[in-house]
């Protein structure tokens, strides 16, 4: 089963996701310039929302870090081990996995590794259990020779045990977004969730804020600013989209259907409320979505981005948000008319602009009152409930 989430979200002037020049990210779509929020930025915002709103218990969350060595060493020291030896033991265990440490910063891995908290805990426990064997590994050499020697000197049963630990640790965010370990491809995890770059429904124009700052202790007879600068920003109405393969999610969570359902619930909640943090202290663009639309289907996936090939703009008494919702509704109707609704278990939509809905009022879709109703109905349909046969709470 697949669950899709479509959002229309209009942000006030903001710079939520910057490029290397500090400008808001953008792209060309439909032949015109659009505002953009990257997929990576959205996923990061979702993961931090898991933590901030306590949507998942800590043991079912992952850590993305280059500082695995220090984390393992800290746990060993907390268990009473000597710090210098703990660092050496942690290094040998990491290298036994085939994960390379950075040449210039040997306290870090060469790249970020995405590990479940339970995986980290089990690695630390293995290091403690195999302490004597790992301490005994000859460390007389340095550099590349030492790495090769250290890895080859570790008993094979320890190396095998370390590799077996990397099973995802039933971390929901890891199961959703997957991981790639270049040095350990057999421990890669296919993502159960696809997240699109958010793009604006409207043509975007970049603007500049020229700002000044004045010294509070500036002498009265002195005029002028002590700091000047510019920052780019825009205001855009975004179409956001993600989908989840529930079978892949259950598989990634080692067959734990209850955890998969809880994880999907957390994802849908977080996706609706997650807002990137870029320049928020300067802009405070805390604008919730104006439309939340969830679809549960057996096959086939439909991004509705092409509803906005022709940019939305205020027209016929409708503002930008209303026109964006109308265009999405119209495009959905065209797709259903062309391909049919076979395989679609149901769709549920909540919006504060219900007058713009037409196609989304017809089966297999149902307007409901609240975002909570959207999420509840989608969860029930995705995991074998019969809410796809219901109309949900009437709007």
Image (cartoon, rainbow, N blue to C red):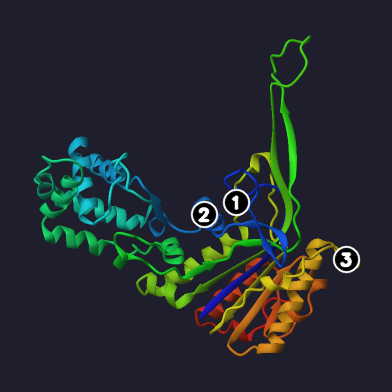
Residue beneath label 3, please? 315
- Report crowding for label 3: few under 14, some 14 to 19, many 20 or more residues within 10 A (C-alpha): few
Which mark is in front, 3 or 1? 3
Instruction: Give the alpha-carbon distance from disc 3 to disc 1, as whole Å.
Output: 29 Å
Pointers 2 and 3 in contact (C-beta within 8 Å): no
Is residue 362 in sight in this rendering?
yes
User: Which comes sooner in the sequence, label 3 or label 1?
Assistant: 1
Residue 323 located left or right of residue 296: right
Residue beneath label 1, please? 276
Residue 78 located left or right of residue 182: left
Q: Quadrant of residue 210?
A: top right
The one of 193 and 144 positioned closer to us in this rendering = 144
Task: Give the residue furthest to the front.
Answer: 31
The one of 238 and 355 positioned closer to us in this rendering = 238
* SS assignment at label 1: loop
Residue 224 spot, x, y in % from top left = 76, 19
- Report crowding for label 2: few under 14, some 14 to 19, many 20 or more residues within 10 A (C-alpha): some
Residue beneath label 2, please? 44
Which residue is depicted at the point 73% across and 70% down? 309
């Amino acid at each position: 089963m697949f669950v899709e989430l479509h959002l229309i979200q209009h942000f006030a002037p903001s710079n939520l996701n910057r490029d290397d020049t500090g400008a808001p990210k953008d792209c060309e779509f439909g032949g015109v310039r659009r505002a953009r929020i990257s997929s990576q930025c959205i996923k990061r915002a979702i993961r931090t929302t898991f933590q901030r709103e306590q949507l998942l218990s800590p043991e079912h969350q992952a850590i993305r870090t280059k500082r695995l060595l220090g984390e393992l060493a800290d746990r060993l020291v907390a268990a009473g081990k000597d710090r210098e030896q703990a660092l050496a033991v942690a290094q040998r265990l990491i290298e036994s996995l085939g994960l390379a440490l950075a040449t210039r910063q040997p306290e870090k891995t060469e790249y970020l590794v995405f590990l479940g908290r339970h995986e980290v805990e089990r690695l630390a426990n293995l290091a403690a259990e195999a302490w004597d064997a790992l301490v005994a590994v000859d460390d007389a050499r340095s550099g590349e020779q030492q790495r090769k020697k250290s890895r080859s000197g570790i008993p094979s049963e320890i190396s095998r045990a370390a590799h077996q630990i990397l099973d995802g640790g039933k971390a929901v965010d890891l199961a959703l977004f997957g991981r790639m370990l270049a040095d350990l491809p057999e421990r890669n995890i296919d993502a159960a969730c696809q997240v699109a770059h958010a793009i604006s429904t409207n043509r975007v124009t970049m603007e500049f804020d020229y700002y000044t700052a004045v010294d509070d202790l500036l002498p009265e007879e002195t005029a002028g600013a002590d700091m000047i600068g510019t920052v780019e920003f825009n205001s855009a109405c975004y179409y956001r989209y993600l989908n989840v393969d529930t079978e892949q999610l259950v598989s990634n969570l080692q067959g734990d259907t209850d955890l998969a359902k809880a994880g999907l619930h957390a994802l849908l909640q977080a996706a609706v409320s997650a807002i990137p943090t870029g320049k928020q202290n300067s802009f405070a663009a805390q604008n919730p979505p104006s439309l939340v639309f969830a679809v549960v289907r057996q096959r086939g996936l439909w991004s509705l981005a092409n509803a906005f090939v022709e940019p939305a703009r205020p027209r016929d008494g409708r503002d930008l948000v209303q026109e964006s919702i109308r265009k999405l509704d119209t495009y959905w109707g065209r797709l259903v008319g062309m391909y049919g609704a076979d395989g679609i278990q149901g769709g549920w939509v909540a919006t504060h602009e219900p007058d713009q809905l037409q196609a989304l009022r017809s089966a297999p879709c149902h307007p409901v009152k609240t975002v909570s109703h959207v999420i509840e109905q989608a969860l029930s349909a995705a995991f074998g409930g019969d809410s796809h046969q219901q109309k949900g709470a009437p709007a």
